[in-house]
Image (cartoon, rainbow, N blue to C red):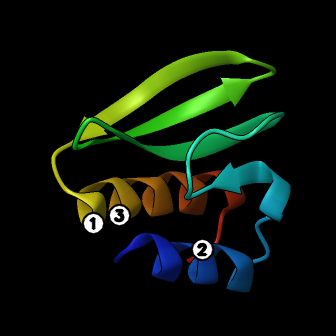
C-alpha cells in the first residue's frame, strides 16, 4: 500500500490522526513515515526525540510495516 492508502486504512480503523504522519515528522507523540534521501524510514517522535524504528528501500514496505505496527498497537483484526 502507499501512504494515502495507509492513511485511509488507519482512519477507518479509528487511529487518531494525531498519532501518526505519513508525510514526514510532525510534533507530538506519533509514528511517522519519512523519505530520507530515497530511503523510507518509520520513526517515532517522542516530543522532539526521534527514534528510528525501521528503514526500507520502498514506500510500500514502510507503509506495510507501519500498518502492521498500528494494527498490533490498536488490536484490530
Return the residue at label 3: 64
Disc with the residue nearer the chain's start (3 vs 2)? 2
Q: Dot 3: what SS?
A: helix
- Horizontal placement of 15 versus 35: left or right? right
Return the residue at label 2: 7
Q: Is 10 in front, or is 21? A: 21
**Closer to viewer: mark 1 or mark 3:** 1
Residue drawn at (34%, 33%) of the image? 54
Return the residue at label 1: 60
Distance from disc 3 to disc 2, alpha carbons, whole Å, reads 11 Å
Q: Pointer 2: residues within 10 angstroms few (<14), some, or many (20+)?
A: some
Quadrant in the picture for residue 71:
bottom right
Q: Dot 2: what SS?
A: helix
Residue drawn at (39%, 62%) of the image? 63
Label placed on residue 20: none
Q: Is residue 67 above or below residue 37?
A: below
Residue drawn at (24%, 40%) of the image? 39
Q: Pointer 3: residues within 10 angstroms few (<14), some, or many (20+)?
A: some
Amino acid at each position: 500500500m502507499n501512504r494515502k492508502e495507509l492513511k485511509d486504512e488507519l482512519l477507518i480503523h479509528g487511529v487518531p490522526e494525531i498519532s501518526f504522519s505519513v508525510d514526514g515528522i510532525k510534533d507530538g507523540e506519533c509514528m511517522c513515515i519519512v523519505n530520507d534521501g530515497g530511503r523510507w524510514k518509520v520513526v517515532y517522535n517522542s516530543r522532539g526525540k526521534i527514534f528510528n524504528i525501521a528503514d526500507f528501500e520502498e514506500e510500500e514496505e514502510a507503509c506495510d510495516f507501519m500498518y502492521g505496527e498500528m494494527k498490533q498497537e490498536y488490536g484490530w483484526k
